[in-house]
């Protein structure tokens, strides 16, 4: 049940297709249902962790798009627009869940979200702690999407070459997924491989079915191709 609620929330927070980046009807309904589950099972640490994760993630939603609906990546978001009420509620829930000493995948994901929400900037995020949590989450789940996110955290801690190394062979598990191309593009850009980054941004754009995400990826490729301003 928790997994289904999380899938609904994710589809609402980052729509897999369509003209809009998010579907707040879905994410809002997932949060409502997660509140009901938490109310029915207040001592279940994973039910509490899932609600905390949703709130800590949804708190960033107001800053994820520009007035015209364009995607704003985490590194560029105006953190003053994040919903501090939701962050406070999520942190309180997470603290209570972790005190039970039974950390599961939703609590670990919520802890990662909490570190992002508490950081004063993208650069000053505690990436080492986030990497340690992704290591733990990967051991818990074996999920290739976790490995993809761990590659990003690894790049922030150890450099883009280390992050890129984690992507080798990941296509065997993820297939030709647009997020794999997108992450590789960002890491190649960090490594200074402009030509490679452009090719990967274009590949990612060709494979996503969300218009806002596609426009962002196409724009990234075009700006890199245009060179320094």
Image: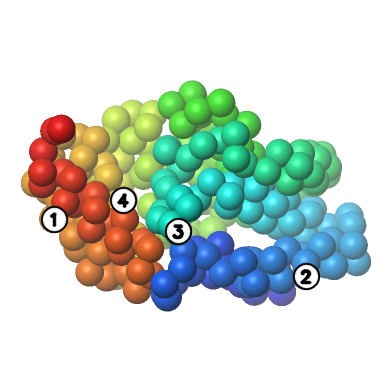
C-beta proximity under 8 Å, tags 4 and 1: no
Q: Position of residue 157 (x, y in %)?
A: 39, 29
Label 3 Cα crowd, 10 Å radius (few <14 / some 14-19 / many 20+): few
Above or below, 174 against 193 in this view is below
- How did the renderer colour the structure? rainbow
Of labels 3 and 2, the one closer to you: 3
Q: Quadrant of residue 34?
A: bottom right
Name the residue: 19% across, 63% down: 203
- From the image, tell me which residue sits under label 2: 33
For residue 75, above or below residue 148? above
Pointer 1 local density, CA inside 10 Å: few below 14, some 14–19, many at least 20: some
**How far is disc 1 from disc 3 in space, using C-alphas?**
25 Å
Quarter placement of the N terminus: bottom right
Q: Earlier in the sequence, mark 1 or mark 3?
A: 3
N-term-proximal mark, 4 vs 1:
4
Mark toward the start of the polypeptide (3 vs 2): 2
Name the side, left or right, on which 212 lies relative to 89: left
Q: Which mark is residue 69?
A: 3
Q: Earlier in the sequence, mark 3 or mark 4?
A: 3
Q: Is residue 79 left or right of residue 21?
A: right
Local secondary structure at mark 4 = helix
CA gap, disc 2 to disc 1? Answer: 41 Å
Q: Which residue is mark 1?
A: 199
Q: Nearer the viewer, mark 1 or mark 3?
A: 3
Q: CA distance from mark 3 to mark 2?
A: 27 Å
Label located before the other in sequence (2 or 1): 2
């Amino acid at each position: 049940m928790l997994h289904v609620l999380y899938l609904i929330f994710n589809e609402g927070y980052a729509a897999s297709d369509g003209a809009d980046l998010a579907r707040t009807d879905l994410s809002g309904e997932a949060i409502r249902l997660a509140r009901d589950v938490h109310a029915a099972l207040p001592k279940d640490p994973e039910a509490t962790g899932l609600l905390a994760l949703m709130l800590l993630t949804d708190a960033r939603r107001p800053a994820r798009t520009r007035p015209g609906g364009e995607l704003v990546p985490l590194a560029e978001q105006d953190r003053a627009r994040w919903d501090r009420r939701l962050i406070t509620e999520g942190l309180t829930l997470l603290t209570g869940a972790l005190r039970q000493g039974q950390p599961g995948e939703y609590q670990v994901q919520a802890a990662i979200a909490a570190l992002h929400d508490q950081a004063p900037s993208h650069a000053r995020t505690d990436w080492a702690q986030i990497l340690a949590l992704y290591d733990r989450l990967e051991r818990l789940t074996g999920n290739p999407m976790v490995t993809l996110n761990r590659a990003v955290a690894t790049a922030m801690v150890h450099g883009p070459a280390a992050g890129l190394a984690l992507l080798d062979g990941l296509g065997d598990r993820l297939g030709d997924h647009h997020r794999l191309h997108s992450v590789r593009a960002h890491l190649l850009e960090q490594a200074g491989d402009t030509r490679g980054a452009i090719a990967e941004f274009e590949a990612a754009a060709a494979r996503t079915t969300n218009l806002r995400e596609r426009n962002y990826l196409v724009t990234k490729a075009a700006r890199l191709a245009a060179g320094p301003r």
